[in-house]
Structures are given as structure tokens and as C-alpha cells.
Image: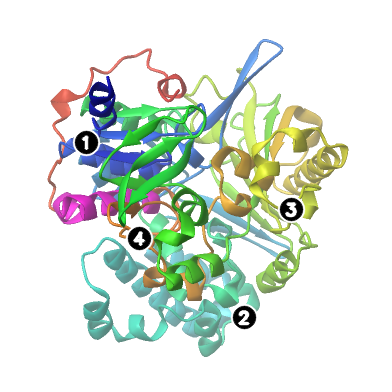
């Protein structure tokens, strides 16, 4: 009896903890290479921050994205397109472009700026907006373009850091210095700086701690187009799950891991939280929160003292507050463009972050406004006909006390906090504040809100177990970038890392890349190099036939 049980336990070549896109991508590539891999997810729906949630209210259906709002690198030759194609999935995920003449609209007190696709158009529009700064601003944009393009080569492992710095002196000089130093060296105005950083809520780092290569890389990411997956963010997770299962692996929901088994300095498998079941595997990849992986799931005694010191010292990114709204009007019919709105009540972005990092809400208006109904009018799950699915988000301080809960994962994992009167009051007030801010770009929406829901950092922590309830992992600041991060290899033999806190960083393309890099380390194969060369790692004929009734959300449960 014991032998049969052991044989069943040892049936997996690898176990992946967490079904975020980094973990799913890693598992899909391992399975494609013949390594039978099991993904374990604590939640009832796979996908991590790429998932959606659904509501049915008074007979109407709603579906809201948790984390995918717009992404780059989806066109031909883009990183996301290549990673999907390597698994035979490229034709199964359709990306819809946002307005190429203004995929994002930056709103400041005295200026509105539409960010176009293409570095040349972007530069021309900037110089038109700031004609008195034409010469210094032109030099800054040229530097940012070089940093962005060369940084992309480095991230995609087309070139090593030493070779890059030797061949590109501008990159060596500026890449890891704060972007504010680059701006100051060229003497551009605070208003021009704010426009250049107008989408930096995508990484949530105060400008004086933002590496210039990070600021440049974000802009470069969208210069070949900004896209949204048809069917919503859940489609990416569901197609990866489809590949994992087709290639011999599996994904299990409601399967929280309580600990990683380490014996004699090597991973042996994992133990599940509820059942106590042990699943043996010689390889474990954690796509879970970095701090909780090291300090809780594995345990500090299995790592070097200097590793534990680094992990404890990492700062988490600022978290987000999100409001999810249904409007009883059709914004597309009213002529509202398919753009993201970034609303900044001040061009002093550094000052806004100073408030947030001191534990206070930003005094100046601060909001990101996006309408899934404009980005994907084909999705029948978003909202009733003639309605609009709208999200408004903002950055908030790290402090748990803001939400009237005690610090620690216990409060977030239980649902008791949700019943607290002060917690609910704070949420309701902030939702109304965000609606008021959004009226600046879509006037009159307050009287058209027929459904509203919101999520705090405590919500995020409850469902993803992320330290501090952040969506972005450890802060992408100058002292926590690149080789200063951990992964994919670790101090523990057989333990690998993927996800937002690895050197790849956060964001859809980056976490998917982290999964490919982790799989590469395990397989001792340069998968990114093979993908660049156009190779397919998987046999697409093993994928199931396309089904017109396929539902990404149901396929992820």
C-alpha cells in the first residue's frame, strides 16, 4: 500500500506554486519539453492578477479584469506574441489595439497629452507641446529611446550587461541612475518631466528612485502598439492552462501549499494546506510572493544568512485601490475614444509619492480610468447591452491601518475585515472620490453608475497572498533592480523562482518572460534564443480543437 502511494506521489517532474502568468508560462514550457508539471493554485480561479471576476446582479452579467488593462509587445515579433507562438497559442489569442493616435491620455491641470504609438510620432508630439524646450527635450527623448530599446535587448537576453555597457556608453552612464538625474542634467521643465512620466503608475516608483531604464522601458513597451486581449485577461491564463493539460501537465485549484519540503539541502516536493497531502517532485518553481516563499513556504533555515537579510530588506511596491463600475450608458456611442486616462492633479509627481510613502492619501487628484467595453466591444460578459464596464484605480499608501486592519496576512486571508464598518466606509468614500475625479474626463458619469464594487490592498492580499497587498511585487527602484533581485536559481537545489519580484520585473510580458527564463534554467536551454529564432517548442497539433462555446473563465476553474 505504501509503495503504491509513493508511486502516485512521485508522478510529477515539477510542481509550480501559483497560477499567475509567470507560473503558467513556466509550466507550459516545461510540459512542452516533456516535463510533466503540476500547477497548484490556492484560489478557485487560475490566473493571478490576470484573472477576471464575474457578478450577476438583477439578472445582468458583469465581468471585470483584475490586472490586465493594456499591454505591449503583442504585435508580430513582439515578446508576448513570440512566447505564445512557441507554445502554438498565438492564433488562439487575439489582441485588439487601443487608439494608436492616443492609447493613453495624460491629464494635468493645464495640459492634456495624447500618447501615440511610435517613437518618432511621440517625439514630434512632445516637441509640439513644449516648443521652448525643443533642443534639450529632443536630447532627452533620444536618450530614453536608446535606453528603452537597448534595455529590451538586455531583458530578452540578446546581449549581456557587460557587452551592452561596453558598446553603448549612454546606457552605461544613465541606465541605473534615477531618471530625475537625467532630466536635471538636460534642464527640462517640471511639466515636461511629468508628461514623460505620465504613465508611471504602471510601476509605481517615485521619480527620484526610478531607474532611467525603467522609465524608458515602459514607454518603449508601448511604442509598437498598446493592446488588450479579446475576451479579457482571463484568456491568457486559460490558453496557457489549455497547453499545460494538452502537453501532459495539470492545474489544480483550491490547492494552497503550506510548505515546500526540503531535505539535505534539496527540494523534495510540497505539502498542501488543507489536506496535508504531500506531492513529491524534484523541481519546485514558486510563482508566489517572494517574501512568503522564502520566509514561510521554504523557511529561513534553508537559505544563506545574506539571502535572508536581502529578502527581509526588500521594499514592496505601493499597492492599488480599484473601483469597478457599470454605467447605464454606452461610452462608445457617445464618442469617447479607446484610450486610457491618467489623471494627475499636479505635475509634482515626486511630491505625490512623498505623501503616499508617508502613509497619507495623495492630496492632488490621482486616478487611472479605463473602459473594458471600449477596448473589447465583442465580449458579451462585460456588461448588459448599452452599458459600459469602467474601472477607476489609484495608488494608495502601504499602511494596513488605512483600512482598519492589523498588519499581517491573517487579517487578509480571513473575510472578517470585510464586515468592519470603518473598512466599508473608507472604501465607499474613496470610490466616490474616484468617480468625482473621473468626471474630469468623462463628464456626468456619476449619475449613470448602476453597479459599483471595489478592492483594497487587503483584498489583493487575501486572494493572491502578496505581501502588503501589492500587485507589482518588490519595488522596482534603483536599489532593487536587475541582479539585485533573486531568481530564477536559488540557494536551495531544485527550487526556482518566477514572477514579478524576479529580475524580469512585473507586468504581463515581464512575468511571462520570467516563466520562460525559469523553464530555461531548469531545462538548461536558451528558450528565449530559440523563440527569437522562430522555433516552436511545443507541437500545436496536440492542442484541442477550437470551440466556439469556449469560456476562458470556466476553463480556468
Position of residue 27 relative to residue 180, above or below, is: above
Q: Is residue 286 left or right of residue 336?
A: left
Residue receiving disc 1? 31
Q: How far apart are marks 1 and 3 (CA)?
A: 40 Å
Quadrant of the image occupied by residue 360: bottom right
Given contact means CB atoms under 8 Å apart, are the residues at marks 4 and 2 in contact? Answer: no
Q: Which mark is residue 189?
A: 2
Front disc: 4 or 2: 4
Front disc: 1 or 2: 1
Q: How far apart are marks 4 and 2 (CA)?
A: 39 Å
Residue receiving disc 4? 487
Instruction: Using a 10 Å C-alpha cutoff, classify the residue at mark 1 as few (fewer than 14 neighbours), some (14 to 19) or many (20 or more).
Output: many
N-term mark: 4 or 2: 2
Q: Distance between the residues labelled 4 and 3?
A: 28 Å
Given contact means CB atoms under 8 Å apart, are the residues at marks 4 and 1 in contact? Answer: no
The magenta span reads 509-532
Q: Which mark is residue 400?
A: 3
N-term mark: 1 or 3: 1
| Magenta-span inclusion, residue 485 | no
* Quarter placement of the N terminus: top left
| Magenta-span inclusion, residue 511 | yes
Secondary structure found at label 4? loop
Amino acid at each position: 500500500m505504501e509503495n503504491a502511494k509513493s508511486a502516485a506521489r512521485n508522478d510529477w517532474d515539477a510542481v509550480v506554486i501559483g497560477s499567475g502568468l509567470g507560473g503558467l508560462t513556466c509550466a507550459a514550457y516545461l510540459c512542452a519539453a516533456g516535463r510533466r508539471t503540476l500547477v497548484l493554485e490556492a484560489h478557485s480561479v487560475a490566473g493571478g492578477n490576470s484573472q477576471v471576476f464575474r457578478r450577476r446582479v438583477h439578472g445582468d452579467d458583469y465581468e471585470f479584469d483584475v490586472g490586465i488593462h493594456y499591454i505591449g509587445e503583442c504585435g508580430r515579433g513582439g515578446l508576448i506574441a513570440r512566447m505564445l507562438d512557441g507554445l502554438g497559442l498565438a492564433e488562439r489569442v487575439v489582441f485588439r489595439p487601443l487608439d494608436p493616435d492616443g492609447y493613453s491620455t495624460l491629464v494635468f491641470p493645464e495640459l492634456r497629452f495624447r500618447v501615440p504609438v511610435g517613437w518618432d510620432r511621440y517625439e514630434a508630439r512632445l516637441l509640439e507641446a513644449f516648443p521652448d524646450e525643443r533642443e534639450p527635450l529632443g536630447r532627452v527623448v533620444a536618450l530614453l529611446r536608446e535606453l528603452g530599446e537597448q534595455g529590451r535587448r538586455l531583458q530578452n537576453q540578446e546581449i549581456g550587461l557587460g557587452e551592452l555597457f561596453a558598446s553603448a556608453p549612454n546606457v552605461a552612464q544613465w541606465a541605473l541612475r534615477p531618471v530625475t538625474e537625467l532630466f536635471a542634467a538636460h534642464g527640462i521643465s517640471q511639466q515636461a518631466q511629468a508628461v514623460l512620466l505620465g504613465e508611471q503608475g504602471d510601476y509605481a516608483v517615485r521619480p527620484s528612485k526610478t531607474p532611467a531604464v525603467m522609465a524608458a522601458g515602459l514607454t518603449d513597451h508601448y511604442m509598437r502598439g498598446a493592446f488588450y486581449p479579446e475576451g479579457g485577461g482571463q484568456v491568457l491564463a486559460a490558453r496557457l492552462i489549455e497547453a499545460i493539460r494538452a502537453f501532459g501537465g495539470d492545474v489544480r485549484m483550491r490547492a494552497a501549499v503550506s510548505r515546500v519540503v526540503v531535505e539535505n539541502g534539496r527540494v523534495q516536493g510540497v505539502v498542501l494546506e488543507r489536506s496535508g497531502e504531500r506531492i513529491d517532485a524534484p523541481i519546485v518553481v514558486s510563482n508566489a510572493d517572494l517574501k512568503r516563499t522564502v520566509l514561510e513556504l521554504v523557511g529561513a533555515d534553508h537559505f544563506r544568512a545574506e539571502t535572508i537579510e536581502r529578502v527581509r530588506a526588500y521594499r514592496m511596491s505601493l499597492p492599488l485601490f480599484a473601483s469597478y463600475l457599470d454605467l447605464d450608458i454606452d461610452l462608445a456611442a457617445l464618442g469617447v475614444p479607446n484610450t486610457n486616462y491618467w489623471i494627475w492633479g499636479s505635475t509634482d509627481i515626486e511630491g505625490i509619492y512623498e505623501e503616499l510613502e508617508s502613509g497619507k492619501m495623495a492630496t492632488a487628484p490621482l486616478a487611472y480610468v479605463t473602459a473594458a467595453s471600449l477596448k473589447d466591444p465583442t465580449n458579451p460578459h462585460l456588461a448588459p447591452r448599452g452599458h459600459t464596464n469602467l474601472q477607476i484605480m489609484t495608488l494608495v499608501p502601504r499602511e494596513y491601518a488605512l483600512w482598519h486592519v492589523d498588519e499581517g496576512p491573517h487579517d487578509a486571508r480571513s473575510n472578517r475585515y470585510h464586515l468592519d464598518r470603518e473598512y466599508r466606509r473608507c472604501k465607499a468614500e474613496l470610490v466616490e472620490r474616484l468617480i468625482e475625479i473621473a468626471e474630469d474626463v468623462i463628464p456626468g458619469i456619476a449619475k449613470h453608475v448602476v453597479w459599483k464594487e471595489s478592492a483594497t490592498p487587503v483584498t489583493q492580499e487575501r486572494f493572491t497572498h502578496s505581501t502588503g497587498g501589492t500587485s507589482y511585487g518588490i519595488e522596482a527602484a534603483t536599489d532593487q533592480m536587475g541582479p539585485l533581485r533573486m531568481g530564477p536559481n536559488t540557494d536551495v537545489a531544485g527550487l526556482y523562482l518566477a514572477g514579478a519580484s524576479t529580475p524580469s520585473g512585473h507586468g504581463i510580458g515581464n512575468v511571462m518572460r520570467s516563466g520562460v527564463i525559469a523553464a530555461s534554467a531548469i531545462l538548461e536551454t536558451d528558450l528565449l534564443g530559440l523563440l527569437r529564432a522562430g522555433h516552436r517548442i511545443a507541437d500545436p497539433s496536440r492542442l484541442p480543437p477550437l470551440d466556439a462555446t469556449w469560456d476562458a473563465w470556466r476553463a480556468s476553474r
